Amino acid sequence: MAGLRAPALLAALLGASFALWPAPPVDPPLPPPLDPGQEASERAASEAFDRAVFGDHLPPAVDELLILRRASLGLLGVVPSLERIQALLVDPRPGRLDRQLRAMVDDPRFRARFAQ
């Protein structure tokens, strides 16, 4: 055992299963936020894709409040707060639902829920 390095020595002392433990995952960096021009062009590209795939038979649009409720229940385990609903309704800018979803993912309750 004199020629073994520290990881190999630990594996030899603690058993082979120690050496097979996976390394903890590394979170990839988040992409930079889109500026309003990019956001609008991505929305236009998405609408063009939907028209190409679905033609004149587009599926009905889903209400943003329904998406907010379903996402909140799935991500946080609770219905959205009144403040979050009001923030969605009074925000006139495009991408308002995306901002609310990002806020849910940044919420500590999201990390606690998915860490279990």
Image (cartoon, rainbow, N blue to C red):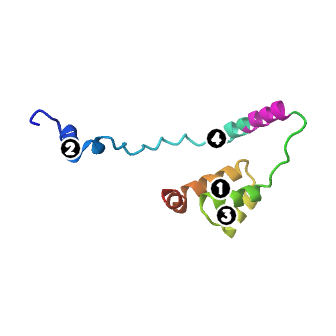
Describe the element under mark 3 as helix, strand or loop. Answer: helix
**Residue type, numbered disc 4:** Asp
Q: Main secondary structure of the magenta part?
A: helix
Q: Which residue is mark 4?
A: 35
**Residue segment shown in magenta:** 43-54
How many residues crowd mark 2 within 10 Å: few (<14), some (14–19), many (20+)? some
Label 4 or label 1, whichever lies nearer to me, is 1
Q: Which residue is mark 2?
A: 10
Q: Mark 3 and 1 residues: CB-CB less than 8 Å, in contact?
A: yes
At 82% across and 30% down in the image, what residue appears? Answer: 52
Q: Which residue is mark 1?
A: 100
N-term-proximal mark, 4 vs 1: 4
At 81% across and 32% down in the image, what residue appears? Answer: 53
Quadrant where the image shows the N terminus: top left
Image position, residue 28 (x, y; %): 48, 41
In the foreground, 64 or 38? 64
Q: Mark 4 and 2 residues: CB-CB less than 8 Å, in contact?
A: no
Position of residue 22 relative to residue 77, above or below, is above
Judge left or right: residue 57 versus residue 24.
Answer: right
At 89% across and 38% down in the image, what residue appears? Answer: 57
Position of residue 57 relative to residue 113, above or below, is above
N-term-proximal mark, 2 vs 3: 2
Separation (CA) of disc 4 from disc 1: 16 Å
Question: Magenta span has 36?
Answer: no
Separation (CA) of disc 4 from disc 3: 23 Å
Separation (CA) of disc 2 from disc 3: 51 Å
